[in-house]
Amino acid sequence: MKNRLKVLRAERDWTQAQLAHELEVSRQTVNAIEKGKFDPSLPLAFKVARLFGLRIEEVFQDD
């Protein structure tokens, strides 16, 4: 699944660790999602979208 997580994080000058803290996940999880190696659960995807004030479709796109 493609996503804009890295871009959204960079726009806020957040490290992967800072984003992971906000989402209550590990930095490795953030890294894997950004690289497309891991698709987040639906609850986590909604949490990401809410954190950035976006709709889930604005963050994640189906391949």
Image: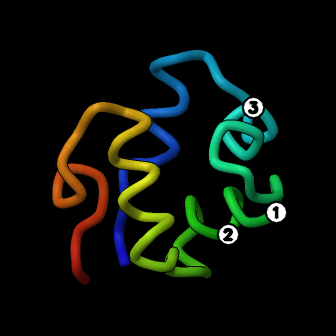
Q: Which residue is mark 3?
A: 18
Task: Tell me the quarter of the picture where residue 60 sits.
Answer: bottom left
Q: Position of residue 33 (x, y in %)?
A: 58, 67
Q: Is residue 46 toward the left or the right of residue 28 in the image?
A: left
**Dividing the image into 4 quarters, which one contains the C terminus?**
bottom left
Which residue does the image show at 61% across and 80% down from the upper left?
Answer: 37
Location of residue 21 with respect to 37 vertically, above or below: above
Which residue is at the front of the view, 55 or 36? 55
Q: Which residue is mark 2?
A: 32
Q: Position of residue 56 (x, y in %)?
A: 24, 57
Q: Which mark is residue 58?
A: none
Density class for disc 1 (Cα within 10 Å; few <14, some 14-19, many ≥20) is few
> Marks 3 and 1, how far apart in space?
12 Å
Which residue is at the front of the view, 43 or 4? 43
SS at circle 1: helix
SS at circle 2: helix
> Marks 1 and 2, how far apart in space?
6 Å
Amino acid type at circle 1 is Gln
Location of residue 51 with respect to 57 vertically, above or below: above
Task: Tell me the quarter of the picture where residue 30 sits.
Answer: bottom right
**Dividing the image into 4 quarters, which one contains the N terminus?**
bottom left
Task: Tell me the quarter of the picture where residue 15 sits.
Answer: top right
Amino acid type at circle 3 is Gln
Q: Which mark is residue 28?
A: 1
- Name which of mark 2 and mark 3 comes first in the sequence: 3
